Image (cartoon, rainbow, N blue to C red):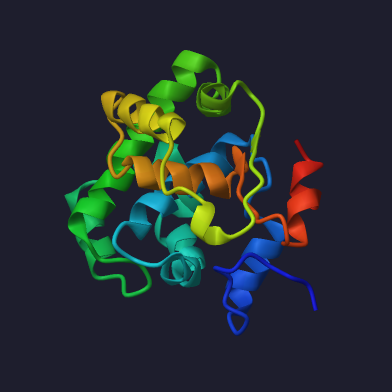
Amino acid sequence: MATRCEWVKSNNELEIEYHDKEWGVPVYDDDTLFEFLLLEGQQAGLSWSTILAKRENYRVAFDDFNAEKIIQYDSKKVDTLLQDKGIIRNKLKINSIISNAKAFLDTKKEFGSFSNFIWNFVDGKPIQNAWKTSSEIPTNTEVSDLMSKTLKKRGFKFVGTTICYAFMQAVGMVNDHTTSCFRYEEVKSLS
């Protein structure tokens, strides 16, 4: 049996699949980066497995995270979303998705792509860590502090430093698989 990072619950198929196929893999596609940034923001105060279980519902509810469509949402659409049991029904979080869509499109326009902008925080290449245990892994770093501050200035919401660091881990801007995890070397070779 493969050794995985300690945070993965052995009885949670969604977590296992996410860990084994997505977590830490460098992502450069704007739409995928946008989805991860939004989902990490939705996680605030909750567990990632809660969001992972609702991920497909979010995709349906928010037009596959199409920012062009999301910026058109009005109060009627927000009311509909607040009734959707498949997502986190928090008005601030729902409204943050709409404002983040606008900030995302503005940033994308200014930098040519959101990927160009966001990967600049790590000079375009993943940071390779070598943690032995998950207890060594930080919840934020100077880079995530700067990213959070910059995103907030650009109008993004639910982008605190811990959320930004979790986002960096998810999209492979940092390799935080522990060295004993079977994915550590695999993910390292992708950078």
Q: Is residue 40 above or below residue 100?
A: below
Would residue 149 be visible to someone looking at this image?
yes
- Specify the quadrant of the image occupied by residue 112: top right
Count the marks: how many? 0
- Residue that appears at 42% across and 49% down: 139
Whether 47 is drawn above or below 108: the answer is below
Question: For residue 76, which quarter of the picture?
Answer: bottom left
* x then y, percent, for residue 148: 35, 33
Quadrant housing the C terminus: top right
Residue 57: quarter of image = bottom left
52 in relation to 142, above or below:
below
Considering depth in this image, is 127 or 131 the residue closer to the camera? 131
Q: Position of residue 51 (x, y in %)?
A: 43, 65
- The reply, left or right, for residue 132 in relation to residue 117 is right
* Residue 157 higher or lower than 152, as above or below: below
Percent position of residue 143, x then y: 45, 30
Residue 127 drawn at (x, y percent): 63, 34
Residue 80 is left or right of residue 173, and the answer is left
**In the image, what residue occupies the spot 81% across and 42% down?**
189
In percent of the image, x 48 and y 41: which residue is there? 34
- The answer to whether residue 132 is left or right of residue 92 is right
**Residue closest to the eye, 95 or 63:** 95
Q: Between residues 5 and 99, which one lies in front from this camera angle?
A: 5
Q: Which residue lies at the image location 57% right of the left edge and 44% below the top edge?
A: 32
Asked if residue 76 shows in the view, the reply is: no
> Which quadrant would the N terminus be assigned to in this image?
bottom right
